[in-house]
Amino acid sequence: MILVHLRFYEELNEFLSPERRKVRFEKQLLLPTTVKDLIQSCGVPHTEVDLILVNGNSVDFDYRVGDGDDVSVYPVFETLDISDVTRLQERPLRRLRFVADSHLGKLVRRLRLLGLDVTFDKHVRGRELIEQAVSQKRVLLTRNRQLLMANIVQRGYCVRSDQPDEQVVEVIRRFDLGNNLKPFSRCLRCNGLLKPVPKEDVLHRLPPMTRETYDKFFQCQNCRKIYWPGSHFEKLEQFVETVHRRFASKRNTNHQLKHSD
């Protein structure tokens, strides 16, 4: 019998049963195991973990826990420098790309509106979704923590909220994307890139009222869908502005804190 002590920090507690949150607790093991399997047996996906300390020393996922080990588990630090210890997640990619599971369709539309590269197919699930994330080197977005526990998944995020607008904030904050948004640059239907197109080139595809009212058009380079700033555009602009304000406020707060030390 192996007895270990564990303590999970910050948002990792959301995956634990109430009696294990924000406290140090004991766990008995019948057989030796890796610290990765130990953590996931508590319900925490390995993709959410960036730092593990065992008896005060940083270790990787392959460390085999021993009797009496004291294990502290920390979440991903995308904006904090902990370079002097063993970080377990890959550093933020220069150009992040995502794949979302079949339950996140509304989130996908909002992320694409902000210019983020997100593939989505409501018919692709389970192992096929995982293989797509791995083969295309995409970050897996899901509310199913079991998918993130697959050994081959390298980067992923378990979306907490069930509200699409809050889900957007979660993803942007988690991957520090506040300065990497390019609104209205992607097709909401297929994720393709949009480019300006002369009105005369698409005139034959426009409704009569649109021909008379609008002069600025964009076309998806993949599915050829046409976009223009119609009556719904103001609402979309308001959403984008709300997101920008939220993260601009955060950046200003961080800047003030740095100069107040």
Image (tube, rainbow, N blue to C red):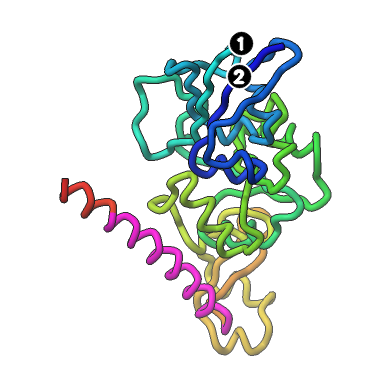
For the N terminus, give its image quadrant.
Answer: top right
Q: Residue at x 67, y 43 (%)?
A: 17
Quote the CA–CA distance across marks 2 and 1. Answer: 6 Å
Considering only vertical position in the picture, is 155 above or below 234?
above
* Pointer 1 local density, CA inside 10 Å: few below 14, some 14–19, many at least 20: few
Q: Is residue 135 visible?
A: no
Considering only vertical position in the picture, is 228 above or below 58?
below
Q: Furthest-left residue in view?
A: 260
Q: Residue at x 56, y 74 (%)?
A: 228
Report helix, strand or loop for mark 1. Answer: loop
Q: Residue at x 50, y 24 (%)?
A: 52
Q: Amino acid at mark 1?
A: Asp
Q: Which residue is mark 1?
A: 67
Is 250 within the magenta?
A: yes
Q: Which residue is mark 2?
A: 4
Left or right of 146, for residue 228:
left
Relative depth, front residue between 200 and 158: 158
Q: Position of residue 54 (x, y in %)?
A: 50, 17
Q: Position of residue 187 (x, y in %)?
A: 61, 60
* Pointer 2 local density, CA inside 10 Å: few below 14, some 14–19, many at least 20: some
Report helix, strand or loop for mark 2. Answer: strand
Q: Magenta stretch?
A: 231-253
Q: Amino acid at mark 2?
A: Val
Q: How many marks?
A: 2
Relative depth, front residue between 20 and 241: 20
Left or right of 8, for residue 202:
right
